[in-house]
Amino acid sequence: MKFPVSPLICGVHPPPISEVKGWLAAANPQLPLIDLCQAIPDYPPPRELTDHLAQVMLDPLTSRYSIDEGLPEVREAVCSGYRRLYGARINPDQLCLTIGASQALWLAMVTLCRAGDEVIVQLPAYFDHPMALAVLGIRCVFAPFDEATGGLPDLAAISRLITAKTRAILLVTPSNPTGAVIPPDTIRELYRLAASRNVALVLDETYNSFITGGVRPHDLFEDPSWSDHFVHIASFGKTFALTGYRAGMLAASEQFIQHALKAQDTMAVCQPRVTQHAVKYGFDNLVEWVARNRVMMERRHEVFRAEFAKGDNAFTLVASGPFFGWVRHPLEGVTGRQVAKRLVEEMGILLLPGEVFGPGLERYLRLAFGNIREETIPEAVQRFRDFRI
């Protein structure tokens, strides 16, 4: 290549999952690989869903575009599901179906911001968010990580970071990478802060169906004026085990969605129809199935916590939830990348280093529980204990 490319994209680190999977060639061949790297369900969608889609594929319309925001009946099914999960006062015109939560994030940011604007991002941050902001020329202003709270946002710290250039406060709950859930009262306070400073509160709630006990994530959607300062990002890929279908959503005011559709039309046109049919089937038929999977993931989390807390473990579990664990490694002055590479080479454990989730996080590692069965957890934790310090 002899022509220049954007210096913005040159300054962004490569996709972390791809980087880490590149280490597999050096993995310990004596040990079966334990994959704690990528947050994907290890179970498939239910047979009744795939049987339904087999019939959907026979319809010639399935191979065509839908309207940009998605089929009305699919958006209505999502609204019905959100009335169950959130008690939401929401209508289909407040939704745009997207190519995963990642595209929903891009739609939200290009609608909110110009190059040079600022977005406050809580550390540790889901790595795709700072990467996207950097590519767009949007300044990522990090709210500091406090290990004592497991990385939960501090209202006063965030308030101090808001400037005339701030356009949004961007948070992930349940957190990727820590698994921590922002309490509903804190979310309400953050919404009030955003409203008082005339910025948007943007919540990425990809794991909203995996909150322990199945409790309501927050009450913002119950407020008739929720869309005044709230933008919601969702993924149904984890909920219905459809990660390869790229099933996401942006929810905001009708006016915001109408602006976002200008970018949607140039970016993706629409979510694929087959994905839309899968999402509708999920909301109409899979409530109990989703609940059973949540309980299974809760159980994995409980077993992992109990095993990790046993003696002679030099690693510290700082925060966790049904999908993630955030661990402090014991090696002073050594980066997360160095420890993560040693773990795959010596112990056959694949995971992500903390520094891909933001600056100053080299002492941490992220563990994802989607790929590890309950019966494998004791062996996985024993490998951490056996790691040579």
Image (cartoon, rainbow, N blue to C red):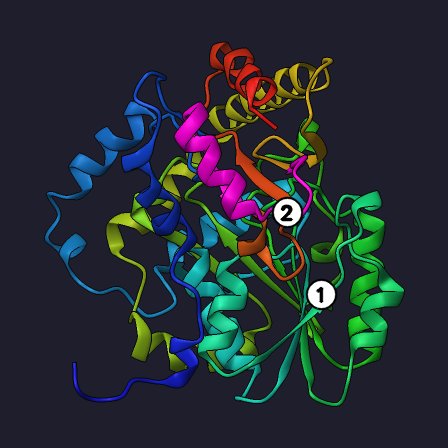
354 in relation to 215, above or below: below
Residue 84 percent location from the top left of the image: 62, 40
Residue 282 percent location from the top left of the image: 41, 37
Residue 94 percent location from the top left of the image: 54, 67
Helix, strand or loop under label 1: helix
Labels 2 and 1: the sequence-earlier one: 2
Amino acid type assigned to the residue bearing label 2 in the image = Ser
Q: Nearer the viewer, residue 27 or 8?
A: 27
Q: Nearer the viewer, residue 387 or 160?
A: 387
Q: Which residue is mark 1?
A: 226
Please identify the quadrant where the C terminus is shown. Answer: top right
Find the magenta span and give its range. 327-353
Q: Which residue is mark 2?
A: 175
- For the point 58% across and 89% down, the residue is 116
51 in relation to 234, above or below: above
Amino acid type assigned to the residue bearing label 1 in the image = Trp
Q: State the image quarter where residue 244 is shown.
A: top left
Q: CA separation, marks 2 and 1? A: 22 Å
